[in-house]
Amino acid sequence: MSPDLEVEATTLDLSVSGVFVCTQVLEPLGTQCELTLLVDGGPPLHMHGIVRRVVEHEEAMSDPVGLGIEFVNVGAAERTWLETVAKRRS
């Protein structure tokens, strides 16, 4: 989400450091964004991020089109939640 745009998307590879957002709406590297993550049965988690990777063309099943987002300024509660989700998925 930005002041001008809000996109609902599926995510992949959620970790404590970031997430990959599958979307056809691409932003340049360095773009700041806000994310609201919804994970099975958990509360919505609001995060700040920066676009660190842009995949413009689907190269393989493991590389869909989208944005690699690095989380920034992660609070203690959010980090704990992310660590719990990451452990559950591994």
Image (tube, rainbow, N blue to C red):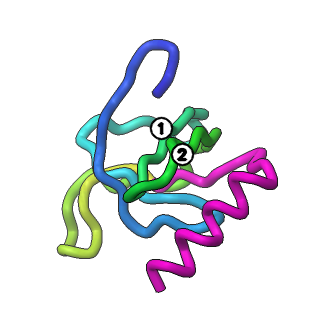
Q: Nearer the viewer, residue 60 or 47?
A: 47
Seen at 51% across and 38% down, the residue is 35
Main secondary-structure element of the magenta-colored stretch: helix
Badge 2: residue crowd in 10 Å (few <14, some 14–19, many ≥20): many
Q: Residues within 10 Å of mark 1 (few under 14, many from 20)?
A: few
Q: Which residue bears the numbered disc 1?
A: 28
Task: Count the marks.
Answer: 2
Residue 41 magenta = no
Q: Are marks 1 and 2 in contact (CB under 8 Å)?
A: yes
Q: Is residue 53 above or below residue 83?
A: above
Question: Which three-letter amino acid code belongs to the residue tagged 2?
Answer: Val
Q: Nearer the viewer, residue 47 or 23?
A: 47
Range drawn in magenta: 68-90
Return the residue at label 2: 51
**Residue 77 in the image: x percent, y percent?**
75, 53
- Real-space CA distance between mark 1 and mark 2, rounded to the nearest whole angstrom: 7 Å
